[in-house]
Each structure stands twice: as C-alpha cells, then as structure tokens.
Amino acid sequence: MYHSLTKSALKWHIWMHYLRIMDEILRQIGAFQDEIEAFDTTDADALENFRIRFLGTKGIVKALMGEMKSVPGDRKREFGQVMNAFKQFAESKFGALTEKLIVSGGGAHGIDTTLPGDPLPAGSRHPITLMRNRIVTIFQRMGFAVAEGPEIEDDWHNFTALNLDEDHPARDMQDTFYLSKSPDWLLRTHTSNVQIREMQKGKLPIRIICPGRVYRNETISARSHCFFHQVEGLYIDEDVSFADLKQTLYFFVKEMFGDDVRIRFRPSYFPFTEPSAEMDISCQLCKGKGCAVCKRTGWLEILGCGMVHPKVLENCNIDPTRYNGFAFGMGIERPAMLKYGIRDIRLFSENDVRFLRQFTAAT
Ligand code: PHE
C-alpha cells in the first residue's frame, strides 16, 4: 500500500521498477535477435508483421519508450540511449532484410524484376487509315509512289488547272468551302490538286497516288459528310492507253476484293479527263444478285477515271503531243464501310473509342 510507504521505500520502488524495465529491454533485444536470425527471408508479409510488432506505433519499442516517465530522473539519459540503440538496431536489421527480399524478388512488397511489365494498352488504327493503307499498298506494288499536298488550296490548283474555268458549270458539281478572307483560297474538293502540283514539277514519267482528306459543303447524313478521304492516281508517260487504265484498275479491284469480282465501265463526264468513265464493281455482299446496299442493281460505283485531258497537260507545261496518261479517283469511306460493315459515315469522325477499339486487330 503506497500510503504506508516511507519516502525511501518509495524511491526503492521506483528503482526496482526501473530495473525491471531494463531487464525487459534486454529480454526483448535478445528475443528480437533470436527471431531475426531464424527469419525466413522470402516471406515479405511475415517480415512486415514482425516489423510492426517491434517498431509499429503500438509495438514493443514504442511501449518501452513510454516507460520514460517512470524512469528515475538521473537514469533518463541512460534509458534513452539504450532504447535508441535498440530502435536503430532493429531498424537497420529490418532495412537489410527488406533489401534482401527486393533483390531476390520475393513477396508482395518487394519488386519482382522477373515479372513481365504491366501491359500498355495499344491503340488501334483508324478504319480509314487501314483502308487507305490497303489501297496504297496495292498501287505501290504496281510502281506508284505516294504524293501528298495541301488541304488549303488556291482556286487554280483545285479548279482552273483541271480545266474548270471560272464560269465552268462543273464547279457546281462539288460544293466548295471558300476561305472567307479570300475567295481565291478554298479547302480542296479532291486530291487532284496534288496531281497538278506533281505535273508542274516537270519530271516525267509520273506514276503517283494521292491519298488525303477533301472537303465538300454537303449536308451531313449517314451516307455523306462535309469531309471525307480520297485516293487519286495519275500515270503520265508516252503511249498510255485506256487499256492500261482498265488493266491497272482491274488488278487493283481483284487484289482488293478478290478474284471473283467483276468490273464495268460507264461513260461519264469529268472536265479533266477525256474520255471519262465511272467504274462499278459487282456487289460483294450479294455477289451481283441485287441487295439493299447495291440498290438491287448488283453493282457498286467505286471510282471515276479517264484519260487526262490535253488541256490539263498543257496547263502544267507538259507537251500533249508527246505525253498522255490516265487518272482515277476514289473515296475511302465507301469501301471501308463495305469491308467493315459500317452503316453510318459519321462514326468515322466522332472519335468514339467504343467504335475505334473494334479495329485493334483489323488489317
Ligand atoms: N477528282 C474526281 C472527284 O473528286 C475523281 C476523278 C479523278 C475522276 C481523276 C476522274 C479522274 O470526284
């Protein structure tokens, strides 16, 4: 009973308590040493539990530190030193073990350097790019080179050089976006501007394909948009014939759609070609029998073509008595819609990842 203790007896009591604590510290240091020596150095979870038991906020070291208040004043310094030494010793041991675990790649808290890395989700190519590449590759195999040019173009390269004078009624065939600052500048309505620029360079013969984006002021619907993509082609040399044009395009559609595809040419009109034609392929969905996609005709129109008009050659300083050639142009959206079963052209430009992700594995 404390109230009956004399002053010296009280001191004695404090002193004994201090010795018991010191005893307990030594015991815990010994226990720690035994445990850490026998420790399974591959078990990260057990190591963490072990660490928490000794060094955690409710751990043994902290609890012993809490005894500081009952340590006699002249012993506080010594007590502090012992406890700090214990703490540092434990920390350095845990540090060394954790490092060992990391290096050997064990456990949930270590980094296993032998595991494969986290996969980075790869994007997918846009279906327009896929179709463009397919078209381009086939023509490249026939010796055509890719040529590209500006989307903002002057009137001359987009129209006049192509035999469309200012008051030519065929300008109305393609509703044009003009730049409000100058009526001479516009968004190209076809990639034929690239062909003009290529012919102006004066290096002959020419065998190019011109893929790119074009713009027309059309009402946006499931079937048409105010911008779309084209691949146009141009071949200029001596003695080029319409038979060359037909054979080139026939090879292309066979590569593109398969050996059983049939083609037909219908006479048409373009100011920059003479004669001009539109080419149809047998409908690949109904195999020519007639369905909703080909409007029961069994045929699908895929491109315009013709022999380059002599006036176009003249406009580009090419001698039409020596050189001639053929040109053709096709949209990319339509064949892409056919190949991938896309029913609405607007999907191409909406950037909906649910749509785009479907093409991850497509070619
Ligand atoms: N430039 C035409 C268009 O955009 C396509 C075409 C190109 C037709 C070459 C004939 C020859 O519609």
Image: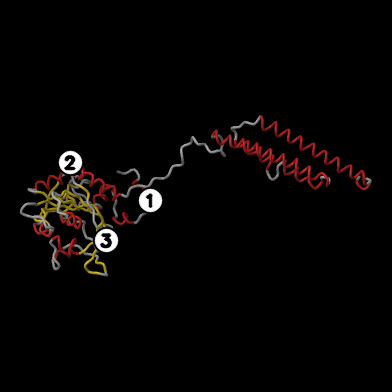
User: What amino acid is at disc 1?
Assistant: Arg
Q: Could you classify mark 2 by the number of other residues whose Cα lies within 10 Å: few (under 14), some (14-19), or many (20 or more)? A: few
Taking depth in this image into account, of 261 and 234 the one nearest to the observer is 234
Question: Can you identify the residue that label 2 sits on?
Answer: 260
Q: Is residue 298 visible?
A: no
Residue in the foreground of this view, choosing between 177 and 9: 9
Q: Which residue is mark 3?
A: 226
From the top left corner, tell me how far across and down residue 199 is, in percent.
Answer: 15, 54
Q: Quadrant of residue 94?
A: top right
Question: Where does the N terminus fall, quadrant-wise?
Answer: top right
Task: Name above or below for residue 335 compared with residue 189.
Answer: above
Q: Nearer the viewer, residue 290 or 359?
A: 359
Task: Specify the quarter for ligand 1.
Answer: bottom left
Figure check: 253 above or below 105: below
Considering only order in the chain, which callout, 3 or 1, is on the residue closer to the N terminus? Answer: 3
Q: Is residue 43 left or right of residue 285?
A: right
Residue behind mark 1: 354
